[in-house]
Amino acid sequence: MNSFSYIFLFCLVASIITQWVLVKRHVQHIRANRANVPADFSEKIPLESHHKAADYTQAKVKTGLAELIIGSLILLGWTMGGGLQFLDNHVRALGLAEIYTGALFIMAVFLISSILDIPMSLYRTFKLEQSFGFNKMTVGLFFADMIKNGIVAAIIGTPLLLLVLWIMENSGSYWWIYVWATWLGFSLLMMWAYPAFIAPLFNKFRPLDNEELRTRIENLLTRNGFKSQGIFVMDGSTRSTHGNAYFTGLGANKRIVFFDTLIDELSYDEIEAVLAHELGHFKCNHIKKRITVLGTVFLVGLGILGWLINEPWFYSGLGAGIPSDHMALVLFMIASPAFTFFMQPLFSSISRQHEFEADDFAADQAQTENLITALVNLYRENANTLTPDPLYSAFHDSHPPAPIRIAHLKSKFA
Ligand SMILES: [Zn+2]
């Protein structure tokens, strides 16, 4: 234990206490508003749905808090408990070259972390989601997904990992700039390749065959000069009843994907409005802005790691005896959330700002009323609470709470 150990522990404990207080506030706020549907929604949302949303949200955030505490104990086990050093000693005993030792060590950390994660993930899917009627996944599919994910991660991740470790070893003190450029190039490549090559391994995609809906969507896209590879329907219902729609891919490889569940839940007018919102994200350059923000955060992060990697106190403070490139990478990856947690309100607020902008765009393109009813339907079907605690929401919500979002739409365009 050195001073850095105490700073790390202080930040970790502070972030856990903060999250615990936020969850407590959130649950109290939801309970206090459980008896009645908020006035603006009383015609559209039955009391039964309001109760379900309240109960589901409480169960979800409590599960999240339990996961946070278990995750923090695992983190302490890896670091100060000596788990990483123990693993490092065993991988080193194999006597491989430094780069292969590093890659094997990092893959072992990932594998063990994924295995430790299984019980919580099972609980989330087959207890939490199941008890509120959202889960459609079978145990067989759950494990098949996991194995497939592991294989895809190994095939894609291994060469990347070897490349990063090679750069770190061979490119001097500015290695972090080269690693950053590699990461950025790789991320863009993955964004491009994901819809065509990876997503189909997990889901079935079929072209949207409904003539009327397709024509309406194509009109909306042409009107906005948006080129894509097509409109697809995904069998989201094999895993969950939660509905969604999204744009995916990069450049000419862009696609529009609707969950089959969404098509069942919304009218054509509403689907068009939801799509207009998604299109708004593109038109307002939110994807580019997000890549810029993420890229900057990563560059700063890697720059900091470029300094820490040469400081013995960084390793010993986190329970690792032998400094190395691979140890520095893993320590940085697992320890940094404790330090960056308090930046979350900033990122959440940027994301909510983008949602408002996309809503404004959608309201210009489609009927505002359709977007409002689509949102109300989606909030009801997904059992999202209408009455979040404002402070909790400021920290965690990437999307504005329904009442604020709908009031915004009404004030601007109704
Ligand atoms: Zn959005």
Image (cartoon, rainbow, N blue to C red):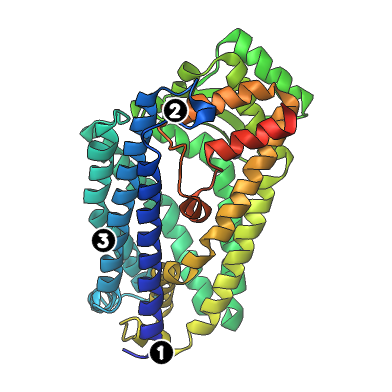
Q: Mark 2 or 3, which is nearer the eye?
A: 2
In the rendered view, tell whether residue 243 sits above or below residue 346: above
The answer to which of 394 and 251 lies nearer the viewer is: 394
Q: Which one is earlier in the sequence, the residue at label 1 or at label 2?
A: 1
Q: SS for tag 1? A: helix
The answer to which of 406 and 34 lies nearer the viewer is: 34
Q: Which residue is mark 3?
A: 70
Task: Tell me what residue is drawn at x 47 percent, y 31 percent.
Answer: 379
In the rendered view, tell whether residue 3 sits above or below residue 169: below
Task: Look at the image and tell me in which quarter the C terminus lies.
Answer: top right
Specify the amino acid type for callout 1. Answer: Trp
Judge left or right: residue 335 versus residue 320: right
Label tally: 3
The answer to which of 333 and 251 lies nearer the viewer is: 333
Specify the amino acid type for callout 2. Answer: Arg
> Around disc 2, counting alpha carbons within 10 Å, would you say few (fewer than 14), some (14 to 19), or many (20 or more)?
some
Q: Which one is earlier in the sequence, the residue at label 1 or at label 3?
A: 3
Q: Position of residue 361 (x, y in %)?
A: 72, 34
Q: Which residue is mark 2?
A: 380
Q: Position of residue 89 (x, y in %)?
A: 25, 79
Q: Mark 1 or 3, which is nearer the eye?
A: 3
Q: Which residue is mark 1?
A: 313
Q: SS for tag 2? A: helix
Q: Mark 1 or 2, which is nearer the eye?
A: 2
Q: Position of residue 383 (x, y in %)?
A: 40, 32
Judge left or right: residue 321 versus residue 208: left
Residue 301 found in image quarter: bottom right
Residue 55 found in image quarter: top left
